[in-house]
């Protein structure tokens, strides 16, 4: 009750104070990009790749499933920038459509990891005691599983397909998020302002959502960016093994698998999907590292 | 000499590993619960007769409560009985014994390569930190972490295998038949697997060495007139070796996991390809058994590196 009556005055007071000290978030973001060329380049690369993938229905020169059986495994030319595959489909267009699936898959895995990992970490860190003990042991156990192998096994049990595969990958990542959040929660819950809020009678749920979560979120943003790179590689692995995306759908991983089959005839066809995965993963990693040094005050100047 | 403090720490670690081991078996067993619908019908395969389904239900104890099933499975597993393959009828234990050594050999080879290549690169980077060479090595390391290793394996097959013919492109020779041939055949897979490892070893070594170089005691050694090389060997590397050991332990787990995909590229008859084949064919006892074998291996390796670090770390005595 008392916390409800207090919150309006604080809510109106805090933003003003913030604005006095530093510029608004969009401005700070632009300043950061200007200061950190690594961040701006990797963000630009990611926006370009994401744009090409999302706009593939309008931008791609051909449909990903349009077959031209007179032109099979053709080398690159003006009409087919990266040649055609074993069914005469345009490899460049498939790369754009496949990107949409691969990036969706990576995002799905990270969202699943966040949805499972964040509440677990918050509860473990905030509840303490035997609840923390149990959750922490489960986290430790999951972390001792070789990640891809667990994902392969879970996919096998739930059924083959891209969504199930990435759900499994997310499940495998969740303990990493949970451990991170738990560690931050342990630190934050000792802070004076959390104690103060508790004294004013704020409920546990309110404490978690209003105070602990916002302060624990920064390392999670960094970790999620880095996990996007790992998830992208996991999608490639699972789709390569035939557990992820199923034909006629296409992803970068399944394109590598197809390219490998015809390696001795058109070796250049497996380069493009592998290279684009590598570039995207490097960009996610670089962005994550830049975010880490920007968000973590102890890392300032180490970037 | 291992002190009392260390003995107590080793004992604690061993005790902590026990619940993890038990939980891991529980998770592996619970995987079966994720199969949608009636597990017995799925296990029996397509067009199975009603008798066959009932037989399977009986054989797997599926009509019993979940915990009883788990207890039975764990009891059997502890006695080396992991069930039989639904497809070939081969005992799962035999499948593991046949395939796991191959995977372990390739994984160990990759770990050794990671250290042999990563350590010199890390030292070069650290001693010349800030130079173009350092930037080059660290740039290559960020590529090494981001490259899909199965794809890198294909490139190796194409160039070193098929074009230059330096190494056999694919295939495998068991290390028990002909060791030198086995190493020969495992070289490309190990190279494909070690990109990530090289990068991580080099990065970790560089950052620990750079940190130590700027520390007080190394500055004192400089002032006393010790040569940089001597400081690096006697004081730098000795201090970072514990960090490095931890990295290598974690690396083993990552590389072991990555074999699942790389084995498919090189047609290696390892445990990874058995897991993938079993998953694709719905052969669940094989999946459970093989995953269990891998998880236990990883837990044991992690525990071993942990204990070794405890014993080796000179700082722990001070606690």
Image: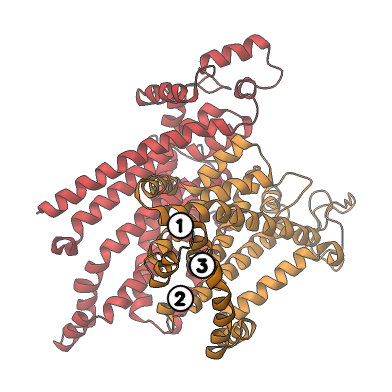
Q: Contact, CB < 8 Å: mark 2 with mark 3?
A: no
Give A283 or B147, whichever is nearer the viewer.
A283
Is A7 on the left or on the right of B206, as rendered?
A: right
Question: Does residue B6 appear in the picture of this structure?
Answer: yes
Callout 1 secondary element: helix
Q: Secondary structure at mark 3?
A: helix
| Residue ID at (54%, 30%) | B32
Q: Residue at x 42, y 40 (%)?
A: B295
Toward the viewer: B27 or B86? B27
Label drawn at residue A296:
2
Which mark is on residue B194? Answer: 1
Disc 2 to disc 1, how far (Cα)? 31 Å
From where the camera sits, is residue B164 visible? Answer: no
Quadrant including the N terminus of chain B: bottom left
**Image x and y of residue B46, in percent:** 70, 21
Q: Nearer the viewer, residue B178 or A214?
A: A214
* Chain identifier of the residue bearing label 3 in the image: A
- Determine if marks 1 and 3 fall on one subunit: no
- Give how far apart the Cα atoms at labels 2 and 3 are: 30 Å
Question: Are the residues under badges 2 and 3 in a single subunit?
Answer: yes
């Amino acid at each position: 009750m008392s916390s409800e009556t207090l919150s309006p005055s604080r809510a109106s007071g805090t933003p003003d104070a913030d604005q006095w000290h530093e510029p608004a978030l969009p401005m700070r973001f632009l300043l950061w990009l200007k200061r950190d060329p690594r961040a701006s380049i990797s963000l630009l690369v990611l926006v370009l790749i994401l744009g090409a993938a999302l706009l593939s229905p309008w931008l791609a020169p051909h449909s990903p499933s349009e077959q031209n059986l007179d032109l099979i495994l053709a080398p690159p030319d003006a009409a087919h920038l990266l040649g055609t595959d074993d069914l005469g489909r345009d490899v460049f267009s498939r790369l754009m459509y496949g990107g949409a699936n691969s990036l969706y898959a990576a995002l799905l895995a990270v969202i699943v990891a966040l949805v499972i990992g964040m509440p677990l970490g918050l509860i473990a860190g905030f509840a303490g005691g035997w609840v923390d003990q149990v959750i922490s042991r489960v986290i430790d156990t999951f972390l001792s599983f070789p990640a891809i192998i667990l994902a392969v096994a879970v996919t096998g049990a739930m059924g083959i397909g891209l969504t199930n595969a990435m759900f499994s990958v997310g499940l495998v990542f969740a303990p990493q998020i949970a451990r991170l959040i738990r560690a931050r929660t342990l630190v934050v819950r000792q802070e004076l302002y959390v104690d103060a809020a508790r004294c004013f009678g704020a409920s546990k749920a309110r404490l978690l959502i209003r105070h602990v979560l916002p302060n624990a979120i920064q390392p999670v943003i960094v970790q999620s960016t880095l996990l996007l790179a790992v998830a992208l590689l996991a999608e490639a692995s699972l789709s390569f093994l035939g557990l992820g995306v199923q034909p006629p759908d296409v992803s970068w991983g399944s394109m590598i698998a197809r390219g490998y089959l015809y390696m001795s005839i058109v070796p250049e066809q497996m380069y493009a999907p592998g290279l684009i995965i590598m570039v995207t993963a490097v960009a996610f990693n670089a962005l994550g590292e830049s975010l880490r040094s920007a968000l973590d005050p102890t890392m300032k100047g180490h970037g | 000499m291992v002190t009392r403090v260390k003995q107590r720490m080793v004992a604690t670690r061993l005790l902590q590993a026990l619940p993890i081991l038990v939980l891991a078996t529980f998770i592996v067993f619970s995987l079966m619960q994720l199969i949608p619908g009636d597990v017995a019908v799925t296990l029996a395969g397509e067009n199975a007769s009603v008798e066959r389904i009932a037989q399977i239900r009986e054989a797997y104890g599926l009509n019993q409560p979940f915990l009883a099933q788990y207890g039975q499975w764990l009891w059997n597993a502890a006695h080396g009985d992991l069930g039989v393959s639904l497809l070939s009828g081969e005992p799962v234990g035999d499948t593991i014994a046949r395939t796991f050594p191959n995977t372990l050999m390739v994984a160990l080879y990759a770990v050794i390569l990671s250290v042999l290549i990563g350590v010199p690169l890390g030292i070069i980077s650290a001693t010349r930190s800030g130079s173009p060479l350092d930037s080059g090595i660290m740039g290559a390391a960020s590529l090494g972490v981001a490259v899909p290793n199965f794809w890198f394996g294909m490139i190796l097959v194409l160039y070193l295998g098929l074009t230059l013919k330096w190494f056999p492109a694919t295939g495998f020779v068991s290390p028990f038949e002909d060791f030198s041939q086995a190493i020969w055949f495992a070289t490309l897979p190990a190279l494909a697997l070690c990109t990530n490892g090289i990068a991580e070893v080099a990065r970790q070594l560089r950052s620990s060495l750079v940190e130590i170089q700027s520390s007080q005691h190394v500055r004192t050694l400089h002032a006393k007139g010790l040569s940089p090389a001597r400081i690096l060997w006697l004081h730098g590397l000795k201090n970072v070796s514990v960090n490095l050991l931890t990295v290598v332990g974690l690396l083993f787990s990552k590389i072991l996991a990555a074999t699942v995909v790389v084995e498919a590229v090189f047609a290696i008859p390892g445990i990874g390809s058995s897991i993938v084949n079993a998953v694709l064919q719905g052969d669940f006892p094989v999946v459970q058994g093989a995953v269990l074998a891998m998880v236990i291996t990883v837990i044991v390796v992690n525990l071993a590196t942990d204990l070794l670090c405890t014993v080796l770390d000179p700082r722990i005595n001070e606690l």
